[in-house]
Amino acid sequence: MIDLGAVAQAVSPMYLLLVFVVVGSVSLGAGIGGHLVGFYPVESAITAGLCTTNMGGTGDIAVLSAAKRMELLPFAQIATRICGALILIVASLLIQILF
């Protein structure tokens, strides 16, 4: 159902760099922030970092199953809903700065 030709045309080196910068920054920030408040940094980076930058509930399941941390699904769902809009705002600001 997805036109892979259109997806391939939309992907550019700058776009890939932007994706890696946003996902890496959010995961690193969530891990450090989680450590500061007494959480495990890896689990806070997974739930608050990676689950906010994926494709919703399906992405949460994919990330948590790959990390073998399915018990964190309720927290991932909360992070997805609350921080999803925040990630879109940060990404839109970064795209204006980089372009």
Image: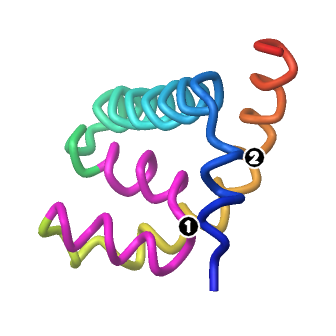
- Quick check: 87 left or right of 32? right
Whole-angstrom CA distance, mark 1 to mark 2, is 12 Å
The amino acid sitting under disc 2 is Leu
Quarter of the figure that contains the C terminus: top right
Q: Position of residue 75 (x, y in %)?
A: 42, 69
User: How many numbered marks have been drawn onto this rendered protein structure?
Assistant: 2
Question: For the point 80% across and 40% down, which residue is it?
Answer: 89
- Quick check: 24 left or right of 69? right
**From which residue to which does the magenta span run?**
44-67
Residue occupied by mark 2: 88
Q: Main secondary structure of the magenta part?
A: helix
Q: Which element is circle 1 on?
A: loop
Residue occupied by mark 1: 55
Q: How is the image coloured?
A: rainbow
Residue furthest to the right? 96
Question: For the point 83% across and 26% down, which residue is it?
Answer: 93
